[in-house]
Image: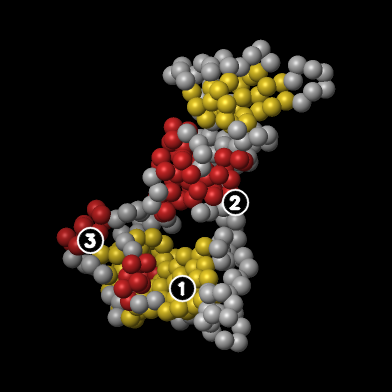
């Protein structure tokens, strides 16, 4: 018998009509994958050292396997989402494993290799990372954000320019608002960078986003916390221009954090120099009877 981290140990009942137990193998004691194993049982969530008997067998996760938690053709996506959530929270691998009550070796395996974690493991990871199981599984990919209920006592406050610059950070996905060639307004998502306090993005000369050049435009980024019904948004307004200096173009291309997600030939760099930075954040308000958490007369506007 040989196993890998993330495999499931299934123990059949020796009695007729009896049940069976299964658990996730979260620890190996031999490099060749032979017993014993550290197993977290699905029915009790307890971890025990197991020397499998003749009534036990290993189930290796397979893509699209019936009953798999994943139900998708890309089980490695869970590991990528876990890692992104961990890095976004600024939590180390060992600390995340401690919070999720699992082996650091197993968490490392989950982040780097296709795996089929149990629902219990996903629940603990989601709790440790301040997110949801649905988010780790990629649920809601085709739904707009912000479908949760509003906070009971929301607080809406304006952000300072310094806070706005911090939230813009260094890169990500934002939206540029332009007037398209037919004169109609358009909002286009783009991968952006912040370099020397300028917002820069790559596009194609014939794209809708290219209409921003030589005009004053608006650029917006935001974040919505689905689980807590909180969020923030930052709006930058300023003139846009094409970056033409060869050394500057090479530097931007060399240090870009990512290539445009939309793909294709997008070699024209556009720079926006903000003349105005504004933003708002929604957070929980105070207890009843305290200072008002939001504007009077009803719930606040969106972030």
Q: Secondary structure at mark 1?
A: strand
Residue 57 pos. (x, y %): 64, 19
Give the CA distance from mark 2 to mark 1: 24 Å
**Image: 91 above or below 195:** above
* Residue for point 46% across, 70% down: 232
- Which mark is nearer the camera, 2 or 1? 1
Residue matched to label 3: 249
Q: Which mark is residue 81?
A: none
Residue 292 pos. (x, y %): 53, 82
- Which mark is nearer the camera, 1 or 3? 1
Give the CA distance from mark 2 to mark 3: 40 Å
Depth check: 303 or 210 in front?
Answer: 303
Q: Which mark is residue 281?
A: 1
Q: Residues within 10 Å of mark 2 (few under 14, many from 20)?
A: few
Quadrant holding the N terminus: top right
Depth check: 197 or 45 in front?
Answer: 45
Residue matched to label 2: 134
Q: Residues within 10 Å of mark 1 (few under 14, many from 20)?
A: many
Residue 293 pos. (x, y %): 53, 79
* Residue for point 50% across, 27% down: 27
Q: How is the image coloured?
A: secondary structure
Q: Secondary structure at mark 3?
A: helix
Q: Secondary structure at mark 2?
A: helix
Depth check: 59 or 39 in front?
Answer: 39
């Amino acid at each position: 018998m040989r196993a890998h981290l993330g495999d499931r140990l299934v123990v059949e009942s020796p009695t007729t009509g009896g049940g069976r137990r299964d658990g996730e193998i979260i620890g190996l004691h031999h490099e060749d994958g032979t017993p014993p194993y550290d197993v977290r049982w699905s029915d009790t969530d307890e971890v025990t050292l197991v020397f499998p008997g003749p009534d036990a067998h290993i189930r290796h996760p397979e893509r699209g396997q019936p009953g798999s938690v994943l139900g998708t053709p890309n089980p490695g996506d869970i590991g990528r989402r876990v890692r992104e959530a961990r890095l976004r929270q600024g939590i180390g691998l060992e600390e995340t494993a401690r919070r999720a009550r699992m082996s650091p070796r197993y968490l490392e395996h989950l982040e780097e290799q296709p795996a089929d974690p149990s629902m219990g493991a996903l629940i603990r990871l989601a709790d440790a990372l301040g997110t949801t199981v649905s988010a780790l599984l990629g649920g809601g990919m085709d739904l707009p954000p912000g479908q949760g209920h509003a906070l009971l006592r929301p607080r809406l406050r304006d952000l300072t320019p310094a806070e706005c610059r911090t939230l813009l950070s260094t890169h990500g996905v934002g939206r540029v608002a332009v007037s398209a060639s037919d004169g109609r307004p358009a909002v286009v998502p783009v991968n952006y960078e912040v370099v020397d306090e300028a917002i820069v993005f790559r596009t194609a000369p014939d794209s809708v986003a290219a209409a921003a050049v030589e005009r004053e435009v608006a650029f917006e980024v935001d974040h919505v916390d689905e689980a807590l019904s909180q969020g923030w948004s930052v709006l930058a307004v300023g003139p846009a221009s094409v970056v033409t200096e060869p050394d500057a173009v090479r530097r931007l291309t060399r240090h870009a954090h990512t290539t445009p997600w939309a793909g294709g030939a997008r070699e024209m760099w556009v720079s926006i120099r903000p003349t105005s930075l504004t933003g708002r954040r929604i957070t929980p308000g105070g207890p009843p009877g305290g200072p008002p958490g939001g504007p009077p007369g009803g719930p606040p506007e969106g972030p």
